[in-house]
Amino acid sequence: MKQVIKLFILTGLVAMTCLSCLKDKSPAITDTIDYFAIPKPVNGLDSLIDTIQHTYGLRVIYKFDPRVIDPTTFFVPASYDKAKGYTKYVVEKMWLQPISIFAPDFAKNQIPIEFLTVGTAIHFNSISSGGAAGAGLNAQYYRLGMGDVNSFSINRAWIREHINILYHEHAHQLDHKFGRPKGYDQVSQGTYYDLQFQYKTDDQAQKDGFFRAYGGYQPVEDFATTVEAIMRFPKDSVMKIIAKNPKLEVKYKMVNAFYLSKGIDLHMMQVKLDSVVKALVP
């Protein structure tokens, strides 16, 4: 009888252990958050974002979750009012519309599908990592991100200058996607400033073969600041700059050809953007 009772108890313990193992292998999932779901419009900005996505295939993001920015990234989200004005005036009117009209092939193939609007600066891995980090944020195929959105103002000078920086940041994305033109990095090889660019003026940098002092930091910024210069200055002014050093002419021709091959004439776009901003902001 004692053996039967022991056997009964042993069988029960084995059953409980097996049941416990089954439960451990099949945990209940209670997470109902879908990070890939597109939220329904709840305000005017959300409606504008939906319209832009339907028209141009790009979704502006001003609400962040772990799918968008990982927990080790430090940033300040843009305020609602600033993000709304920025999305309308900068993203839609000054960037997407002109490209779709004057460079449709570029718009079709080179515009990303996400655009992050960051209120101030963005820092990766550490709050003290530096406030720009644009090349890091934009070194991916599908997403472009811009900081300083909380400084947005319906001001012609601010908008026109910011669009130059936007083209600079988009250049990082194209750099990552296609690589810089063959031989570009060798034009100024051995003469890059590294962090010493902070002690150079733009005039000194141009004599050394860089469009801006920041372009002398490293090749990735050299490429982006060359694009930025073509978008900022009229063509005749660019020609005067490249006359300061033969290296500038080589880089200019490489960058200009690179963008023409992708379906956009940067000089033509520079002129169009001057006209657009004048009509947009009286």
Image (cartoon, helix red, strand yellow):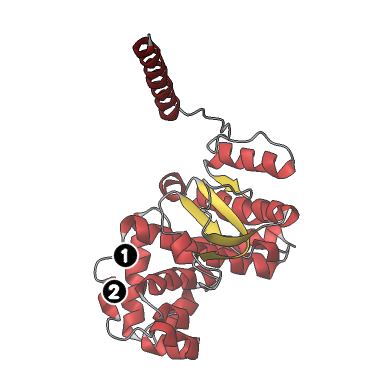
Direction from residue 51 to residue 240 in the image, left or right: left
Q: Which residue is mark 2?
A: 185
Dot 2 crowding, Cα within 10 Å, few <14, some 14–19, many 20+: some
Q: Position of residue 263 (x, y in %)?
A: 39, 53
Q: Quadrant of the N terminus?
A: top left
Label 2 is placed on what type of residue?
A: Asp
Q: Which residue is mark 1?
A: 180
- In 3D space, how far apart are the residues under numbered discs 1 and 2 (Cα atoms)? 8 Å
Task: Using the rendered view, name the quadrant where residue 185 is placed.
Answer: bottom left
Residue 215 visible somewhere in the drawing: yes
**Viewer-side residue, 273 vs 68:** 68
Q: Position of residue 223 (x, y in %)?
A: 38, 70
Q: Are marks 1 and 2 in contact (CB under 8 Å)?
A: yes
Direction from residue 53 to residue 220 in the image, left or right: left
**Viewer-side residue, 233 vs 78:** 78
Q: Position of residue 144 (x, y in %)?
A: 50, 55
The residue positioned 63% from the left and 50% from the top of the image is 62
* Numbered label attached to residue 140: none
Q: Determine the secondary structure under disc 1.
A: loop
**Viewer-side residue, 43 vs 187:** 43
Q: Position of residue 19 (x, y in %)?
A: 43, 21
Label 1 is placed on what type of residue?
A: Arg
**Viewer-side residue, 29 vs 199:** 29
